[in-house]
Image (cartoon, helix red, strand yellow):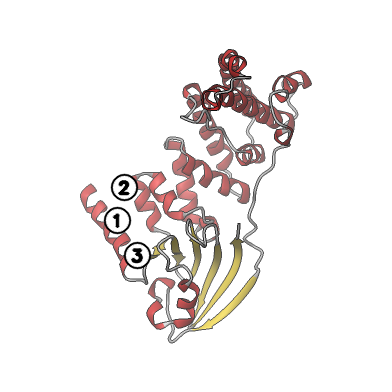
Amino acid sequence: MRSQKIILIFGLLLFATNIWPTKLKVIETKYLITISKVNGLDSAVKITKGMPMYILDRTTTDSLIANIRNSPTSTLTSNFLIEYALNVKDNLELPLTMKLYFDKQIADSNQYKPDSNGWITRLDDDFYVALIKHKTPDLESQLISYYDNWFRMANEYKENYLKVLYMKDSRKRDMFYYPYVNVNEACYQILLALRDIKSTFATQERFQTHLKYLKFYQHSNLSAHIVDYSTVESVEKIHLSKSYKSLGELDIYNEPAIKRYLERYDDPNCSKYIWFNNSEGLMNLGCYSGPDASYGKRYKLKLIGDDLYIYLVYRCIS
């Protein structure tokens, strides 16, 4: 049975890759569940490319979010959960999911080590904002436990930090300098979260313990980056050559107006994705290197008979 499922997934992805113009991948949202079951949650989340699946297929997205309780932590899973948690208000199971996932993060922190550049992965502000938004009665104790783990690391790294503070060999200096600064910034972040939930643990004395090792630009409050997909920058109505029942049936080769959107992204350094749920979809067009690096657009799609509405909801230019 497992081998049959793997063949099914391979066939679906092969279909999505080959039947459409070069490198355009078209994915029906319901198959994310199958991908998650066969290859793991990270594999399904990776295919979403950070797009807001919750506005396209809430049932599928809720199922993936529920699976987070039984999955290990990862950057992909964290980002998927954060995006969902910052934008969804009516999932009554979400506070418990956030709590259980944070428990795993706390446990993982006992194994945190600097990478080859001296950096230690820590949680983004977005994660703390999401935790507070969906807080449980256990959040304060969780944050304190997490702080204690990072504070222990600070004590471990302090001696080496002081030894290399004025060292001229920048490579060797950075290997011991950045871990200490990094853990102090993490401690400061956690204290901000504790302060935001009005915990008495977040004393001025504790703040000052860490602030003196941070640059001024690091002395900021918690903030979350939220993309408002309800705001439409522009909309185009395309009259198609025929009626389609689903976006999955669209014949791109015979719809020149749609091909026009994709042409700029034919470069090998670019990617083109469409996710669809019956007559609604999301389209992500972007480049990750080359002359158009960091240039991209995100669209909502809505099919009504022989008309396709394309809504520009987000653009990235750097």
Work out whether 196 lies above or below 292: above
Residue corresponding to mark 1: 9
Between the residue at mark 2 and the residue at mark 1, the CA separation in whole angstroms equals 8 Å
Residue 141 placement (x, y as % from top left)? 63, 23
Determine whether, in the image, residue 219 is placed left or right of residue 260: right
Residue corresponding to mark 3: 16
Residue corresponding to mark 2: 38
- Give the residue at x 54% y 24%: 169
**Is residue 291 visible in the rendered structure shown here?**
yes
Graded by Cα atoms within 10 Å as few (under 14), some (14 to 19) or many (20 or more), the crowding at tag 2 reads some
Q: Which of 178 and 244 is in front in this view?
A: 178
Q: Which of 300 and 219 is in front in this view?
A: 219
Residue 124 placement (x, y as % from top left)? 60, 38
| Residue positioned most to the right | 204
SS for dot 3: helix
SS for dot 1: helix
Residue 52 placement (x, y as % from top left)? 54, 56
Between the residue at mark 3 and the residue at mark 2, the CA separation in whole angstroms equals 18 Å
Residue 151 placement (x, y as % from top left)? 61, 19
Work out whether 292 lies above or below 221: below
Nearest-to-viewer mark from 1 and 3: 3
- Give the residue at x 66% y 26%: 140
Graded by Cα atoms within 10 Å as few (under 14), some (14 to 19) or many (20 or more), the crowding at tag 3 reads many
Marks 3 and 2, the one that precedes in the sequence: 3
Marks 1 and 3, the one that precedes in the sequence: 1
SS for dot 2: helix
Q: Are marks 2 and 1 in contact (CB under 8 Å)?
A: yes
Work out whether 204 lies above or below 224: above
Work out whether 316 lies above or below 310: above
Between the residue at mark 1 and the residue at mark 3, the CA separation in whole angstroms equals 11 Å
- Give the residue at x 50% y 31%: 117
* Disc 1 residue type (three-letter): Ile
